[in-house]
Structures are given as structure tokens and as C-alpha cells.
Image (cartoon, rainbow, N blue to C red):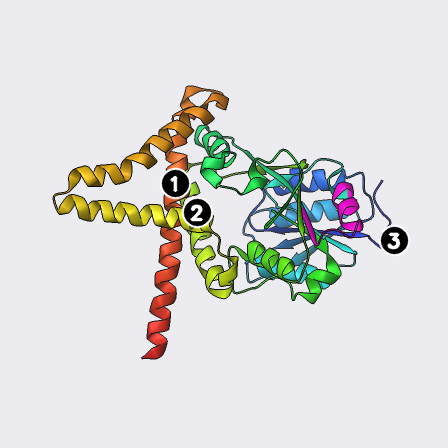
Amino acid sequence: MSASPVEAPEVTVVIPARNEAAFIGPCLESVLRQSFDRMQVVVVDGASSDDTVAIVSSFQASDARVELLQNHRSIIPASLNQALAAARGRWFIRIDAHATVPTDYVATLVRHLESGRWGGVGGRKDGIGLTTQGKAVALAMSSPFGVGNSAYHYATSPQEVDHIPFGAYPVELARRLGGWDERLVVNQDFEFDFRVRRAGYKLLLDPTLVVDWHCQQSISALCRQYLRYGRGKAHVARMHPASLRARHLAAPALLASWAAAILLAVGGRRRTAIAVVTPYAVAVLGASTWTGRHAPTFAVARHLPGAFLAMHVGWALGFWRGIWGMGASARGQRR
């Protein structure tokens, strides 16, 4: 039974969406099936050109908890801030439009937050592949070799972390921190979590909360996504140098070593150049073989090396492009 429109919600569930006609229906269905009833469900549409708005409107007509806001800037941090301003609940829970969640998802998040121990809580993000390459992408993203120590992709036990996906936070805390930084088109969630931790709060990853999330469905799309992620990380690193970890520099360092190997090869030191690139090639082969044990078919498994390369090289290129772009901007300002 849906909550009465006059009943004060305890939770504001926020779903940023743009051109999500293929996914917004199942996402909303999973949210409205929650065992926790007192919810305000806010979908913030980022100027969609498909049927996203029409689909959300049909849910509004049958459930008074659903609200629709319009964000003409079409960027996620602006959508989150718009929803934060409209939030009537005590707890702010973001759910991705590409995701579906289990029926106890909201209730479990609220229980953790009500304990007072945590400034933010999130679950494990399990990739869902629909195409052959998409299934390989999902497997690569569940591998520590692919995502490093981003435990929210593969953790099996609750733990304190430095970042959570699609986090849940006290509304009062999110407002006190000023919401999400609208200068960041990507990586704004990590930057927000950094400010949560800097304010003295801890973040909990509870992997019993499994978020089924439709990942990229091709290797090329995955590479473009990680280009954006890497570039966004460079901007966050400039804003908050203390947020940078050694793992963030692994892929950029790898790419730099390849550039050095090319110079060595051009200079006639081919054996040394081969010695530089061989360890990573062996690691990709080993990780692909190990991860491929879980692939449903060989057709999926054979795309794993490409998926790993797309993630690592895409992220590294994006990071270096971000660093170069910021340097060029600074040089231009000094002229």
C-alpha cells in the first residue's frame, strides 16, 4: 500500500534520469515495492528527449509518493541538489535510473543510518550485462584487477570505505555540506564522500545490499565512460589533493611507462622496452583467465582482455587529459 500524500515521509529517494525510458520503469517498480513505505520518491529528469517523462508521469498517476522535477542543466550534481532542496524526508537515498534494488534496500539503509555510526551507507554494485560484450564488462568490473580496491564492486563483508555508490545520507548533513559540487560533471559522488569523511563521518559499505546495475554494453562505451571517470578524478585531485590515493595513480603510471617503452624502442633498446610492457600483458592474460572461469560462454570470456584494457587505458588517458587541460588553463590565465 502506498503512503498517503499527507503522511510525512521519513525517506526521500532520489533518481536522476536522462533518456532512461528503457530502465526507469523497472527502477521505479523496485523502489515502490520497498518494505519501507514512508517514502518521497523524486525523479529529476535532465531534459530527456525520449519517453522518460511520460513513463514517470504514469507512475505518478497511480502512486502519490512519486514526484517529478525538471533539471534543464542535464547534469547529475544539479539534479541531486534540486532534489535535496525539495527533500521532505530525514534520509536522502540516491538510486541510479539504470538500477533495481531488493525490497529491503531502503529499510536496511535507514537502520544503518539511524544507528548514528555512519555519515553515509551504500551497497554492492553488481553489473548486469545484456550483450556479449556487456557480460564481459560486468565480469571485468567485478574483478579486483579491473577496479582495484573499489570494494563496492565485489565485497562480501561489511566494511568502512572511502566511497560508496549511490549513497544514502542524512538530509541535514547533505545540506550542511552544501550538497554536490556542480562544477563536476563526473566524480561528484566521490568528491562529496570526501567532504563527508573530512567532516568527521564514516562511510559503510554493506554488500548484503545488492544493487543490480546495467553497465555499459560494449567495450568502446566502457572506454568512453572511463575516459570521463579519469578526467573527473584529475579535477577532484586538484580540488582536494588529500583525496588522491596510490591506486588512483596506478593506471596513469602504467600509461607513462608505455610511453617510456616507446621511446626506448625508438632508441634501439627494444629488449628493455619489451621488459617494461610484458608484466602488464601477463597480468591481463592471467586476470582474464581467472575471471573468465565465471563467463557463461567463451564468446564472453574472449572480450575480457579488451574490457580490462578499456578500463585501465581509458581511465589513464582521461586522467592525463584532465591534468593537461588544467595546466593549459593555468598557463592561459598567466598570460
Q: Is residue 47 above or below residue 306?
A: below
At x 43% / y 41%, what residue is drawn?
222
Residue on which disc 3 sits: 7
Q: Name the kind of residue labelled 1 in the image.
A: Ala
Alpha carbon distance from label 2 to label 1: 7 Å
Depth check: 116 or 166 in front? Answer: 116
Residue on which disc 1 sits: 310
Q: Which quadrant of the figure contains the C terminus?
A: bottom left
Range of residues picked out in magenta: 107-121
Q: Name the kind of residue labelled 3 in the image.
A: Glu
N-term-proximal mark, 2 vs 1: 2
Residue on which disc 2 sits: 226
Q: Is residue 48 above or below residue 334?
A: above
Residues at marks 3 and 2 touching, judged by CB atoms closer than 8 Å:
no
Q: Residues within 10 Å of mark 2 (few under 14, many from 20)?
A: many
Q: Is residue 333 visible?
A: yes
Q: Is residue 70 visible?
A: no
Rendering coords of residue 8 (x, y %): 85, 55
Depth check: 269 or 303 in front? Answer: 269
Q: Is residue 39 left or right of residue 96?
A: right
Residues at marks 2 and 1 touching, judged by CB atoms closer than 8 Å:
yes
Q: Residues within 10 Å of mark 1 (few under 14, many from 20)?
A: many
Depth check: 278 or 304 in front? Answer: 278
Q: Residues within 10 Å of mark 3 (few under 14, many from 20)?
A: few
Q: Which quadrant of the figure contains the N terminus?
A: top right
